Amino acid sequence: MLVRRFSEATAIDVHRLRAHVLMDAGELGSRNLSVSWVEVPPGASERLRSHEEAELAYIVARGSGTMSATGDTRELSEGDLVLIPPATDHAVANNGDETLALVSVQSPAVSAEELFSRRLALQAAGYDDDYDYE
């Protein structure tokens, strides 16, 4: 058994969202999973995005919000699970008063660099003015 402490996870800030990479692709001996803890502050949302090869499962650990996928938006609360098939545009939003925390699991594994590098590059270059994060 291997354990990754939350305090040891790499934290990545993307716009107003914060991701803690609990298990990146290939870490801890995993061949098929990557796992992140994602925090979405009140009022924050993200633009639709997809992952071509990976299916994603999100579990709401704390708070409430919405998840949109393929033109459908659903309210989420603590304990809910959302399954996003591969190549499906999706986005999360927090319309509540407290931070929304989600566990995000990808299979096959998607590296944190792949998940976040494009969004970080746009943010650093200032080309993300149309990005809806407030």
Image: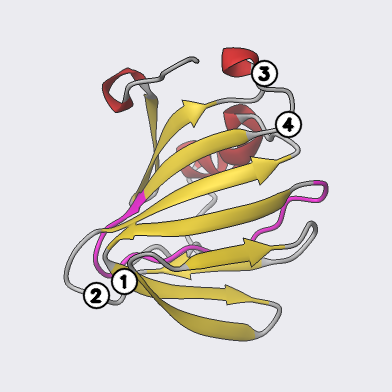
Q: What distance separates the C-alpha of mark 4 from that of mark 3? A: 8 Å
Farthest residue toward the left?
97
**Residue matched to label 2:** 96
Is 45 inside the magenta-drawn segment? yes
Note whether residue 48 is visible.
no
Amino acid, disc 3: Gly
Q: Position of residue 89 (x, y in %)?
A: 70, 66
Q: What distance separates the C-alpha of mark 1 from that of mark 4? A: 28 Å
Task: Give the magenta part as a residue range.
Answer: 39-53
Upstream in the sequence, badge 2 or badge 3? 3
Q: Label 4: how many residues lie within 10 Å, few (<14), some (14-19) or many (20+)? A: few
Upstream in the sequence, badge 4 or badge 3? 3
**Residue matched to label 4:** 32
**Residue matched to label 3:** 26
Upstream in the sequence, badge 3 or badge 1? 3
The mark lying in front, picked from 2 and 3, is 3
